[in-house]
Image (cartoon, helix red, strand yellow):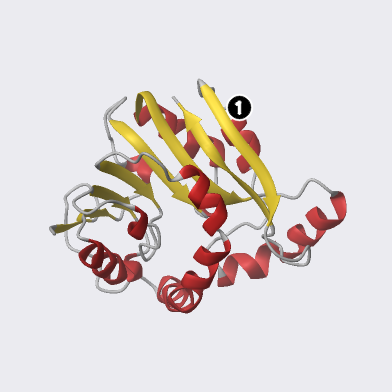
Amino acid sequence: MKSTDLSGSGGSADPVDPGFRARFFAKVWGKISAGVDASFRESKDEIFVDLPDQILELGAGLGDNFKRYAVGTRVLAFEPNTAMHEGLRKAAADQGLELTIDARDLRDSGLADASQSLVVSTLVLCCVGDQAAMVAEIRRILAPGGRFIFVEHVAAEDETTHRIQRLWRVPWGIVGDGCDPAPSTVSAIEQAGFGDLDAQRGRNGSVLNPTHPVYWGIATS
C-alpha cells in the first residue's frame, strides 16, 4: 500500500498544527465514527456496489468507507482536516488500498474535466458551505456515465424539525467542525443536471436529532 499526502498546490507536507477545532473534532469523530457508520449501514449497502478500482472520496474522515473498497483500490481522499490523516493512512493500510491524501478543498484542486469514474461523499456536504458549487464541481469532474454516491443528512421537510435544526446551527457547527444541520443538499443534487438520479429520503434516529433526515442515492453523469 502506498500513501501520499498533498497539501496545497505545491504538494507540501501536512501543516504542523491543523488548529484546535480540527484536532478536537478529529478526536470526537474517532470515538463516534464507528457507531455513526453502523447507523447508515443499510443505506450504504444499497449504493456501494460495483465499485471501480479508482475512487475519489470527498471528506474521507478516518476512512470508515475504506472497508467497502476492494484490496488494491486506488483512493484519492480529499480531507482538509489534517488531524484525520493519520487515521486515514491506517485505514488504508488495514484494507490494502493505494492512498493519496489531498488536504485542499476539491474546488481548488484543478482536476481535469470528466477525469473521475466514481466520487463518494458521506456526511460531507453539510460542511462545505455552498453545496450547489461543490456538487457542480463533482459533476464537472465525473466522466460520462460516472457515478456520484452519497449519503447525507439534510434539512427536514416539516417546519417543526427544520426549526429545531436552525436553532442548533451555531453550537452544532462549533462542535461539528462547521457542520450545518440543515444544509440545502437535496436541491443542490437534484438541480445539478445529472443524467440520472436514484435517491431516497429516510430517518436516522429521533426527530430530536438535528441530523436525523437522511438523503442517499446514486447520481449518474
Q: Is residue 176 left or right of residue 115?
A: right
Q: Is 157 situated above or below 6?
A: above
As drawn, which residue projects farthest toward the right? 160
Total labels: the figure holds 1
**Is label 1 in a helix, a strand or a loop?**
loop
- Please name the residue that numbered disc 1 is placed on: 191
Q: Is residue 128 visible?
A: no
Mark 1 is surrounded, within 10 Å at the Cα level, by few (under 14), some (14 to 19) or many (20 or more) other residues, namely few
Quarter the C terminus occupies: top left
Q: Quadrant of residue 22?
A: bottom left
Mark 1 is on which residue type?
A: Gln
Q: Position of residue 46 (x, y in %)?
A: 52, 45
Q: Is 159 situated above or below 171?
A: above
Q: Nearer the viewer, residue 25 or 154?
A: 154
Q: Position of residue 28 (x, y in %)?
A: 48, 77
Q: Position of residue 41 (x, y in %)?
A: 52, 58
As drawn, which residue projects farthest toward the left? 2
Q: Residue at x 56, y 51 (%)?
A: 43
Q: Residue at x 66, y 65 (%)?
A: 170
Q: Residue at x 60, y 36 (%)?
A: 199
Quarter the N terminus occupies: bottom left
Q: Is residue 148 visible?
A: yes
Q: Quadrant of residue 54?
A: top left
